[in-house]
Image (tube, rainbow, N blue to C red):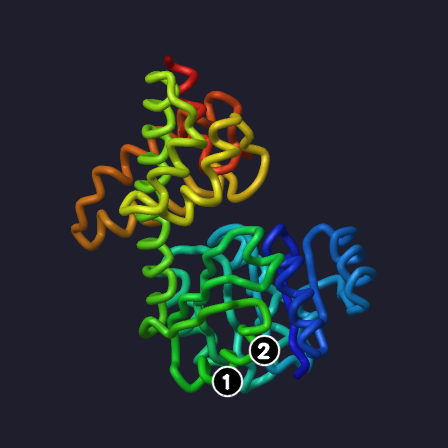
Amino acid sequence: MKVSFIGLGVMGFPMAGHLVKAGHDVTVYNRTESKAEAWAEKFKGEYKSTPKLAVQDSSIVFICVGNDADLKEVMSGEEGVLAGTKPGCVIVDHTTTSADIARELSSVCLAKGLSFIDAPVSGGQAGAENGQLTVMAGGNSESFTKVEPVIKSFAKFTKLMGESGAGQLTKMVNQICIAGVVQGIAEGLHFARSAGLNGVDVVEAISKGAAGSWQMDNRHETMWKGEYDFGFAVDWMRKDLGIALDEARRNGSQLPLTALVDQFYSEVQALGGQRWDTSSLLARLEAFR
């Protein structure tokens, strides 16, 4: 199938590569053209200088950019995605955004004879590189059925959660849960160090029981060593938590732990950890010992 991929960051670069490996004809666009050139050289694909040119004749357009503003930028204008797509095309947005913009763009696309699926992902950089992402989607079921087999090129699990915006709302739940879990692990390791225990040994003992989690299995050793230069950045987590907290104010949800952990992440940023992995909540605790 002829498809396009817009946005070649740490997630989009390998995701677009998996589409090529699955046999699809892929054309890409990236704001920094040198990255698009590097992608084309690595995967023997094609890149274009504008989103409009990249999406022409494609049946599916995948997008993975930074935030609401970035998504609007690549979608709109004379050189945007909407200017180049043909009727019947399905646009699949893997960016983590607000539910509002997903609904807005879905309406715009519908008026142009297009379909829009909000499809944020979970699994981080490693999940993207290994083709093991989880995709939570919102939109029309017929359109989702069309794109699901292609999404599986880079995902281990996909599910339609409801109408437009439901994918983004589900991703908010994902980030809310992660924030609490990582804070708990950070406090546990901080306590272990203060008590004179070996944190790695402690995790080996407790991770096989009720305390176990993906975050514990995959992050405890680097947390114990104070290594945070990988994975999902604090800046991006704060963006995601901000979206969730904004939505909570609208729907009346009470998210006291999420708000607290968001504040803790602001303190990590103040320590210079804007690009540290989200597990760096431990660094904050260690800094205030």
Label 2: how many Cα within 10 Å (few below 14, some 14–19, many 20+): many
Quadrant (top left/top right/bottom left/bottom right) for the C terminus: top left
State the quadrant of the N terminus. Answer: bottom right
Q: Quadrant of residue 144 in the image?
A: bottom left
Q: Nearer the viewer, residue 149 or 209?
A: 209
Q: Which of marks 1 and 2 is in front?
A: 1
- Residue at (20%, 55%) from the top-left corner? 251
Q: Which of marks 1 and 2 is nearer the N terminus?
A: 2
**Residue 51 position within the rendered picture, expressed as x and y whole percent measured from the top left:** 66, 65
Give the answer, above or below, for where 269 lies relative to 49.
Answer: above
User: How far from the left and from the top, in percent, is residue 101?
Assistant: 40, 61
Q: Mark 1 points at which residue?
A: 146
Give the percent coordinates (x, y) of residue 191.
32, 23
The amino acid sitting under disc 2 is: Ile
Q: Pick the residue in front: 127 or 84.
A: 127
Marks 1 and 2 sit apart, C-alpha to C-alpha, by 9 Å
Total labels: the figure holds 2
Asked if disc 1 and disc 2 are in contact, CB closer than 8 Å, the reply is yes
Residue ID at (33%, 17%): 195
Query: Which residue in the structure is indicated by mark 2?
Result: 60
The relative height of residue 97 versus residue 85 in the rendered view (above or below) is: above
Quick check: 20 left or right of 132? right
